[in-house]
Amino acid sequence: MDLSGVSGFHEIIVLTPRGFEEGLDAVMAVREQRTVLLNLSEMESKLAQRTADFVSGGVYALHGQERRVGERVLLFAPSSVDIDQLS
């Protein structure tokens, strides 16, 4: 992948929440045009699902994007970011 013509800077935030309320941090980061890698592996299963649903809804409302990248790992990005999946 040639990145020679790419200018600017895009921040990626890695979050490993331990509580539901930390999901708001992910939504706010996307609102601020940052990409978030959300690792839910430290949360109990039901709480992780609730948090994922909350963040998904918030990012959807912001016209952002979501991709599952692992067992309990999600990628959220603002609409200004293209997420390409290579196989």
Image (cartoon, rainbow, N blue to C red):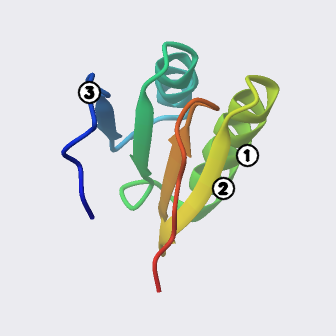
The x, y position of residue 18, in whole percent, is 39, 40
Residue drawn at x 51%, y 62% is 84
Q: With 30 as the anchor, is 13 left or right in this view?
A: left
Q: Secondary structure at mark 3?
A: loop
Q: Amino acid at mark 2?
A: Gln
Tag 2–tag 1 contact (CB < 8 Å): yes
Residue drawn at x 49%, y 51% is 75
**Residue carrying label 1:** 53
Of mark 3 and mark 2, the one earlier in the sequence is: 3
**Residue carrying label 3:** 7
Q: With 52 as the anchor, is 10 left or right in this view?
A: left
Among all residues in the image, which is located at the extreme front?
A: 5
Give above or below for 12 relative to 22: below
Instruction: Name the residue nearer the viewer: 45 or 80.
Output: 80
Q: Amino acid at mark 1?
A: Asp
Q: CA distance from mark 1 to mark 3?
A: 33 Å
Q: Amino acid at mark 3?
A: Ser
The quadrant in which the N terminus is found is: bottom left
**Residue carrying label 2:** 49
